[in-house]
Amino acid sequence: MKGDLHIHSSFSNDGKSTVEEIVNNAKRMGLGCIAIADHNDFRSYDIASKQDQIIAVPAEEVSSSEGHILAYGISCEIPRGRSVLETIDMIHDAGGIAVAAHPYRWWSGLGEENVVSAFDAVETFNARSTEGSNDKAVKLAESMNKPMTAGSDAHHVSHIGNAYMEFSDGITDWEGVVKAILNKDAVIGGKHRTRADTVKYGYKSITEWIGRGFRKM
């Protein structure tokens, strides 16, 4: 079973697709599970979890004071703007696991110095990150003996599945997906961001950053 564990819907301020569009497209692609991890918003799960023939993992991409953190298996929205350790603690208190999202991304990654041992896993294959950044993330996870995750970081349905995790077909619920992550029982694959996409992404990110008053998303 393939799953894309990093997707954004229109509940994210930069997402372009509705939850329904994401679910329908993921099913057409043959994905068995998805995690719609919107920026500082948890509303997508209530909609996605009601859809048939696909597993929806409760998720959110939380903006900590130092960078983005993925939360999987949470029961409620995690507030933004707290320190890394505070954010991890709140994720754990909500029943979830904390994953260092694209740690080497210049714009919103935590940076190696902020990927602390309290993290449950590291995102090592993000389709919107360069191959070099993803390779560094793999080495970081290996040095910390942490599980690895992957996702497209899609902000439009056309990018869903650009990075993925492949799980056992015996998994039937999101709890099984989270357990497989922690047990390192998944194969990661996909494609990295190209040089041309890097130029486009840099221009977009800087423009949006200025528009937000030089504040992280």
Image (cartoon, grey):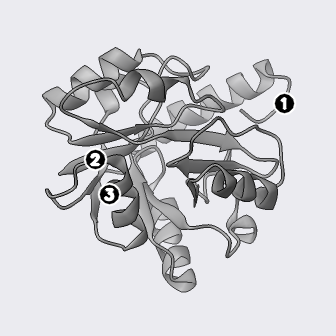
**Residue at 77%, 36% in the rendered image:** 216
Q: Within 10 angstroms of label 2, few (less than 14), some, or many (20 or more) residues?
A: many
Q: Nearer the viewer, mark 2 or mark 1?
A: 2
Label 2 with label 3: CB-CB less than 8 Å: no
Tell me whether circle 2 and circle 1 mark residues in contact (CB < 8 Å).
no
According to the picture, the residue beneath numbered tag 1 turns out to be: 214
Q: Return the x and y of residue 4 as percentages of the image width and height.
A: 33, 44
Compared to 84, does 40 lie above or below? above
Residue at (51% x, 21% y) in the render? 15
Residue 84 position within the rendered picture, expressed as x and y whole percent measured from the top left: 77, 57
First in sequence: mark 2 vs mark 1: 2
Nearer to us: label 2 or label 3: 3
Q: How far apart are the alpha carbons under marks 2 and 3?
A: 12 Å
**First-in-chain label (2 vs 3):** 2
- Secondary structure under tag 2 reads strand
The numbered mark at residue 3 is 2
Residue at image point 79% right, 24% down: 210
Task: Kindly report the distance in space between the C-alpha atoms of the residues bearing marks 1 and 3.
Answer: 39 Å
At label 3, counting other C-alpha atoms closer than 10 Å, the crowd grade (few under 14, some 14-19, many 20 or more) is some
Mark 1 crowd level (few <14, some 14–19, many ≥20, 10 Å Cα): few
The numbered dot on residue 176 is: 3
**What element does badge 3 sit on?**
helix
| Amino acid type of the residue that numbered disc 2 sits on in the rendered structure | Gly
In the image shown, does 122 or 107 lie closer to the viewer?
122
Q: Which three-letter amino acid code belongs to the residue tagged 1?
A: Phe
